[in-house]
Amino acid sequence: MSQLAKLQSDFQAYLMDDVKGAAFKAHMIDDEKVGAKKRLGIYVDAYRLRIIEALATTYPKLKALLGDDLFEITARAYIKQFPSKYRNMRWVGDKMQTHLEQTLSQHPIAVEMAAFEWALGLAFDAEDAPNFTLQDLAAILPEDWANLTFRFHPSYHLLPLQHNVVQIWNALDKEEIPPNALQTNAPCLIWRMDLNAHFRSLDTTEYAALQSIVEGASFGTLCEQLQENASEEDATIQAAQYLSGWLNDGLITKA
Amino acid sequence: MSNTQQLPHLTSPSLGFGLGLRTEHYHPILNSKFSESLKVDWFEVLSENYMVPGGKPLYFLDKIRENYPVVMHGVSLSIGSTTPLDADYLRDLRKLADRIQPAWISDHLCWTGVHGQNMHDLLPLPYTEETAKHVVERVGIVQDYLGRRILLENVSSYASYIDSTMTEWEFITEVAEQADCLLLLDVNNIYVSGYNHQFDAKVFIDGVPKNRVQQIHLAGHHNHGDYIIDTHDAPVIDPVWDLYEYAISRFGAVSTMIERDDHIPELAVLVEELQIARDIAAKSLEVAA
Ligand SMILES: [Fe+2]
């Protein structure tokens, strides 16, 4: 290892653990005015504070849910457990869900909140794609309808949730006291519309409908699927309503 | 310095006076009535913030680019690191440059991590021949890949190595001349590091190659008494304005901008602060002429 490589390796080790890495201090000028320990301490603190801030930006409601103190403890432990491998701070929090499963498993709501906020972040800057519009739909010939399949926007994400995370998120967003954590089984649809991340809970029928369409089922297949619980006419109306809703939400893109 | 006259002219003409682009200002910048009278000549964007797949950041960047020259400023190139250059990062950087056609691309003369880790900080380098050689080699690779000269910025530092064998300005000069790259001179950082390491900021300014300074940064900081931390959360202080005047009298008209990363005020407040830079530069150039 070159001298420079050794210096950098030791400097980094010091930033991660200034007790274990203390020997590195001898490489820095130790003056009367400030002193090497305090000087390096500026870097030691800045490293953590910068990442804690980035995590708070990615997980604002998780922070509100845990409170400042527990969030900071969690963030510090996270930094130790999952040092950043990313050039872009935006990705630094990608292991938060795993981290919370390991450290706060008694609070499954925190785990789900992290999953939810991470998904919102992914929707926010997912790839762009041109929307499939009602005009595009109008151009489809009647005989082609049954075989019509759809491509979903890159920001589209279906998140299975076991708790009332969405309600808690909404309350925290309005700076209200959040409801208690409750078990529910409400899958959540997350996507980007008009440049902002959106989300809504899905009922089981729409969830199933979306899942099959995303997996490549045709409009005709969707109608058949809905007929299991409705008349042919009602099923077709339902399928058309779903489709126009997804179009309006910008969920479907041009093929 | 006797051969100054013969030095090749490497820098592009000044873009004037700019600001760092911040999300808080997207709307006021794009509000058409305001932008007609907006006295900002160009914007600097933090490259990494826009090295994302899509969505709002790129949408606004494209819009702003339609109306203003833009320069790209990165924090994660890690040019001084002993870990190999990150090919994915360079690819994404080039992709962004292809998209927005920046006037130029800059990053910092520092390192940000080793062993595949990123500490997300601008860590200081020891000023040695070994380091200079290492950085020069890597700048060469980056410039070849990007097909252009890059600008390297002097960072604020809080600690210095006993291993250093030259001053920071000697180191910068050696790197810039050997690598044939350009410089982004952060006048505030010179002040901060000068305060922290007790050197004369003017000697620093006098010591860097005049023909390679393409951009100047100005910013505020936080003075803790014994040392200064470069926080970019406050207005530029008077001693830094004085240094700026000194720098312009030496380098001539150089693209100048103010960085504000925290406690971000309304756009109009920064535009007003930028006017101070305009006035100082005008005065300084008048005296020089
Ligand atoms: Fe700077």
Image: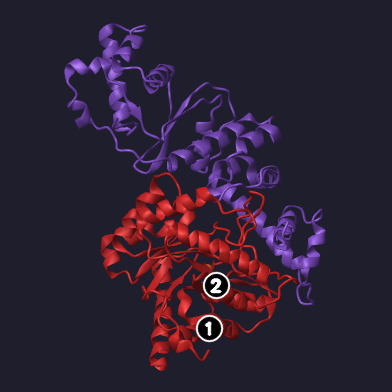
**Mark 1 CB near ligand 1 (8 Å cut):** no
State left or right for residue B81 relative to residue A230: right
Query: Which of the 4 quarters of the picture holds residue B123?
Result: bottom right
Rendered shade, chain A: purple
State left or right for residue A8 relative to residue A159: right
Q: Amino acid at mark 2?
A: Gln
- In front of the other: label 1 or label 2? 2
**Label 1 is found on which chain of the structure?**
B
Given residues A210 and B181, the one toward you in this image is B181
Of the numbered discs in the image, which one, if any, rests on residue B243? 1
| Other residues around mark 2 within 10 Å, as few (<14) / some (14–19) / many (≥20) | some
Rendered shade, chain B: red
Q: Is residue A61 above or below residue B227?
A: above
Percent position of residue B118, x then y: 62, 52
1 and 2 marks in contact (CB < 8 Å): no
Which quarter of the rendering shows the C terminus of chain B?
A: bottom left
Q: How is the image coloured?
A: by chain
Percent position of residue B173, x then y: 56, 77
Of the numbered discs in the image, which one, if any, rests on residue B178? 2
Taking the spot 52% from the left edge, 34% from the top edge, the residue there is A116
Circle 1 SS class: helix
Q: Please say whether residue A9 is visible from this viewpoint.
A: yes
Q: Earlier in the sequence, mark 1 or mark 2?
A: 2
Percent position of residue A121, x then y: 48, 41
Q: Is residue B132 above or below residue A216?
A: below
**CA distance for labels 1 and 2:** 27 Å
